[in-house]
Image (cartoon, coloured by chain):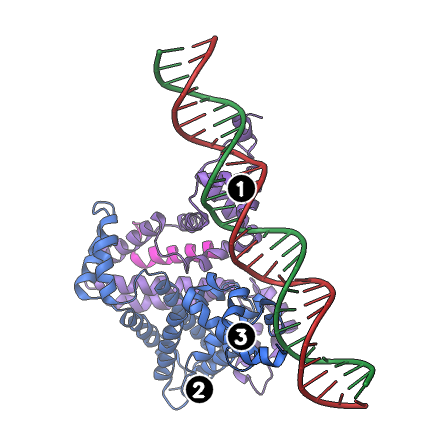
Chain colours: A blue, B purple, C green, D red
Amino acid sequence: MSAREQREAASDAGLSKQRVVAEAVRLADREGVDGLSMRRLAGALGAGAMSLYHYVANKEELLDAMVDIVFEEIDLPRKDADWQSALRRRAISARQVLARHPWAIGLMESRTSAGPANLRHHEAVTACLRKAGFPVLMATHANWLLDSYVYGFALQETSLPFGTADEFANMAEADYLPQLPHDEFPYLNESAQALLAAGYDPAEEFLFGLDLVLGALEPLRVSA
Amino acid sequence: MSAREQREAASDAGLSKQRVVAEAVRLADREGVDGLSMRRLAGALGAGAMSLYHYVANKEELLDAMVDIVFEEIDLPRKDADWQSALRRRAISARQVLARHPWAIGLMESRTSAGPANLRHHEAVTACLRKAGFPVLMATHANWLLDSYVYGFALQETSLPFGTADEFANMAEADYLPQLPHDEFPYLNESAQALLAAGYDPAEEFLFGLDLVLGALEPLRVSA
DNA sequence: CGCCAACTCGTACGCTGTACTACGCACGTA
DNA sequence: TACGTGCGTAGTACAGCGTACGAGTTGGCG
C-alpha cells in the first residue's frame, strides 16, 4: 500500500493538524479525556499512532490545541449591541460550549499559555468593555469577574451527576436526599426540596448570577 | 523483617487511609498531579505499591479523598459574624487553599460525588444565607454564584504563569507583551501596560469581584 | 536518473493502574 | 503451648500508556 493510498484511507483524505485535533475533540466528547490516547486517536483516524507526531509535537500540544478549538466555538461579543447584551450573549455561548465539552474545563488548569482563540476573545471582550466606558483597570476587573463566573459555573455544572431538571428530580429522590440526614443537613434538605418543587434548570441558574454581575458592573462605567 | 517492623519503618508508624491520602496531597503539591502514581506514593510512604489498596479501593477513590481533604482546609463561615463578613472570609480562605493545592481544582471536574467536607461547607454556607434572610431559592442562587466565582477565579489563577506582582512584571516584559502585536491586540496591550504600572496582585483582584458580588446580593435579602 | 524532503509506521522502553497470589505475623482459642 | 485464622503486605504479571528511534515509501526537483 502506497503512502498516498494510506493517506486516502485515513478516514477521508489526508491527515492534517486540523483533522487530528478535531478528531481528538470528538473522541474526548464521546469517551472523556481519559479515553483519549494517541493509539485510539490514531485508530479513529485510520493511521498509526506514531503518524500523529508529525502534526503535534506531543500530547501536551495536542491538548493545548483542543482547548483552543473549544474557545473558537464560543461566540465573540457583537460589536453593534450594547455592552450588557454583547457580553451576556458571549457568556451564554461560553457556558453552552463548555457544557458540550466538559473535559475542556479540567484541561485549562494545567495549561499556562493562552491559545490564539483565547487571546482573540480576551481582546474582543476588553474592547467591548472599554468602549462601554469602563476605565482600563476596571475593564480588567470586569474581565476577571465575568470569566471567573463563567468558568466556575461550567466547572460546577460538569461535576453535577445530572444535566436537566427531570434528571435532577429522578436523581434527587433516588440518591441524593437519602444520604443527607435531616438532623445533620437541615438546610441542604430544605433547598433540595425547594429545588425539587420549583424544577431546576442549569441554564436559568446561570442567568441569575450573570445578570446580577452585569447589573452590578453597570454603575462602574465612567462615560454614559 | 516482621510485618510490624515493616509498618514501623513505613516512614513513621503504620499505614492508614489518612496517612496515605495526606502523603498523596503532599506529593501532588510538590510534583503536580501527573507526578502522583501509586508506586511513587507507596515509595514516599516506605511501602509497596499494592499495600495502598488496603486503604483505598482504587486511584479514583484516592483522588476523591484528596479533594475532600482540601475542602477540609477551607474555613467554615463564622456563625457570629454578619453574613457578608462570614462569607467573605470563607471565600478568601477558599481561594488561598485552592491556590495552595492547584491540582484540586482540575480534579473537581471529573468527580461527581461531593465528599463529606464539601457537604458540610454547603450546609454551613446555606445556613448562613438563610439566617441572613435570603429566601430558599435565592440562597441556592447565591450559593451557585459565590462558588462559581471562587472556583472560576482559582481556575484562572492556576493557569497564570506567575503568582505575584513582581513575577508578573518580569514575565510581562519578557514574554507576554512581545507576542501581542499592537495592531492586532490594542486593548490587551493597553491593559497589560496599565497592570504593569499599577502592580498586580491576585488577592486584591479576587476581592474586587467578591465584594461586588456580595454587595449585589445584599438587597435580595427579605427580612433585614 | 539520483536525491531529498515529507510522511508513515513497527518496534521497543519505561512507565502506569491494578488483578492475582502467596507469605508472614498477631491473635483467639483449645 | 500449639494451632488455625485472618489481616496487612508485597512480588509478579498484564494490558495499556506516551514516545524515541529508525526504517520504509513516496512525489517532486535538479
Q: Are marks 2 and 1 on the same chain?
A: no
Q: Given this view, does label 3 or label 2 mark the residue nearer the observer?
A: 3
Left or right of A157 on screen, residue B45? right
Could you tell which of marks 3 and 2 lies nearer the N-terminus?
3
Which mark is drawn over residue A215? Answer: none
* Classed neighbour count for the residue bearing mark 2: other residues with Cα under 10 Å, few (<14), some (14–19), many (≥20): some
Tag nearer the camera, 2 or 1 = 1
Q: On the same chain: label 3 and label 2?
A: yes
Vertical arrangement, residue A107 with respect to residue A15, above or below: above
Residue holding disc 2: A131
The quadrant of the image that shows the C terminus of chain B is: bottom left
Residue type indicated by callout 2? Lys
What segment is highlighted magenta in the picture? B78-99
Query: Is B94 in the magenta?
Result: yes
Q: Residues within 10 Å of mark 3 (few under 14, many from 20)?
A: many
Task: Say what amino acid the circle numbered 1 marks.
Answer: Ala
**Secondary structure found at label 2:** helix
Q: Residues within 10 Å of mark 1 (few under 14, many from 20)?
A: some
